[in-house]
Image (spheres, coloured by chain):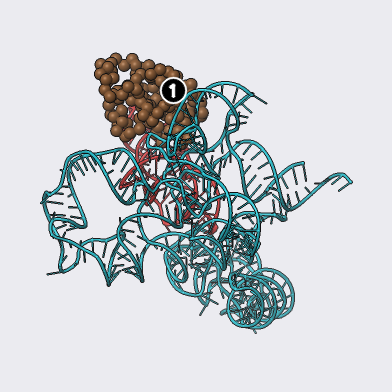
Chain colours: A brown, B cyan, C red
Amino acid sequence: MKSEDQSLKKTEIIRRKADFDRVFKKGKSIVDPFFVALFVQNSLPFSRIGVSVKRKFGKATLRNRLRRLVKEVYRTGKEDFPEGYDILFIARKDLSDLFRRREVSFFEIQRVLRRIANKIGEMPDEKDCTFPDRFLP
RNA sequence: AAAGUGAAACGGGUGAUCGCGGCGAGGCCGAGGAAAGUCCGGACUCCAUGGGCGAGGAUGCUGGGUAACACCCAGGGGGAGAGAUCCCCGGUAAGGGCUAUAGAGAAGCAAACCGCCUGCGGGCAAGGGUGGAAAGGCGAGGUAAGAGCUCACCAGCUGUCGGGCGACCGGCAGGCUUGGCAACCCCCAUCCGGAGCAAGUCCAAGCAGAAAGGGUUUGAGGACGCCCACCGAAUCCCUUUCGGGUAGGAUGCUGGAGGGUUAUGGUAACAUAACCCCGAGAUAGAUGAUCACGCGAACAGGAUCCGGCUUACAGUUUCACUUUCCCU
RNA sequence: GCGCCCGUGGCUCAACGGAUAGAGCAUCGGAUUUCGGCUCCGAGGGUUGCGGGUUCAAAUCCUGCCGGGCGCA
């Protein structure tokens, strides 16, 4: 997959409850001031993302905006993210505070998510399982 | 022109690039006035069905509108304001309860602290004082001093006559008078069966219930309780306990008490008719991002659907009206 | 989508509609002690979550918001 493909289909978003449960239960975590990222391998030739936003984060418009920004960052920069993972971003309180003051732009979310994506790629103990999964349907 | 009152409308434009959801699939459509809070009212679905009583709840001036409402329109009374206008609304001579402190006395044959009068037995409720409230108000007559004791006016009550569908309004007469709180219980009138789209229906997958106890054709049980009718079960019903599985898909799911224009009826809310229009259907949940145009800034994102109410809201526009000032 | 509860000093809780909203812990000051603790005495600290209403009078009653918690499907 090359960077020309900037579409984001339904299948590239974590939707089923079982998938969410799997990430929550088995996923490894990366902690950032704005997000906690959980990720796990998904036996697919591409990655899927999900966003978890608590009701306490803000009102519905704010929660929707965060989801859209995260999806937009992933869509326009898939080459920055490793393939074959389910990645779940959980918004933290510091981000909520900034959101309420409207001090968060697309580029800041992009910067933060790229930083997290690089860390996922660097995780050493995951490499063992990466290759066999590529031959699965 | 200034100050103000009341209605109503708009509320993120244009272009480029990359994207998202739906469907009859190169096309078209794709969040709001509040989508919100979930405070009311319905539609719809299930509880087998019908009726009565009760409990509980809601509403509360009158008439009308509506599917219905706690909403809307018109009217009545009271209050605030200079006015446009705004706010409030059943019953206290059915009963019970509460009215602290202060005060002589706080709810009915009232009471006498200071006081007024006196024939020293007593009489009085005008003045002072207390209080949110002192048993009609105010003025005159009257008297030893006083009092609806008498009279005029005003308020209230009862009766009566007239107007209005009615709430009420107006006139006359009477006897002289009844504190406040029902957003305390209560009374009266009217209305309401219960649960909710995670309702409900179908398909697929999966596990483990022929588990244990109790009940029942002498009627268990049947969605607030009771009663009547009715329905109703022997591997197949009801109930308690323990244990196990699923969290996928379809349907409900959007064309409706729907909008717009015109005409008619009505003071109006609204109703009726004709013609035209079709405007989301997701399910970790679709509208976004970047750039340019000087800035792009409110509250805020559908989840079964409608009618209201309430709350939030940058900026802007329109209409009607009031008061004051100036000019013609 | 429904149903229910709570909000009072820094914390945990009281208060038939009636006086200056109380109690314990905590805080501060003093006494006691060589010092500290314990103990004793005293003091400060409240928009009763916010707004409007009923009432002579509201933490209490009614109502609209705000915040928090619980239960059912």
Pointer 1: residues within 10 angstroms few (<14), some, or many (20+)? Answer: few
User: How many discs mark residues in the rendered view?
Assistant: 1
Q: Residue at x 32, y 22 (%)?
A: A45
Residue at point 44%, 19% (across, down): A4
Tell me where residue B253 appears, x and y as whole percent: 41, 46
Residue A42 drawn at (x, y percent): 30, 25
Q: Secondary structure at mark 1?
A: loop
Q: Looking at the picture, how far across and down is residue B109, in whole percent?
A: 52, 77
Q: Residue at coordinates 38% horizontally, 30% vertically from top-left? A: A10
Q: Is residue B215 left or right of residue C68?
A: left
Foreground residue among B65 and C49:
B65
Q: Residue at x 42, y 21 (%)?
A: A5
Residue B90: x percent and y percent?
A: 53, 67
Amino acid carrying label 1: it is: Gln
Q: Can residue A71 be seen here? A: yes
Residue on which disc 1 sits: A6
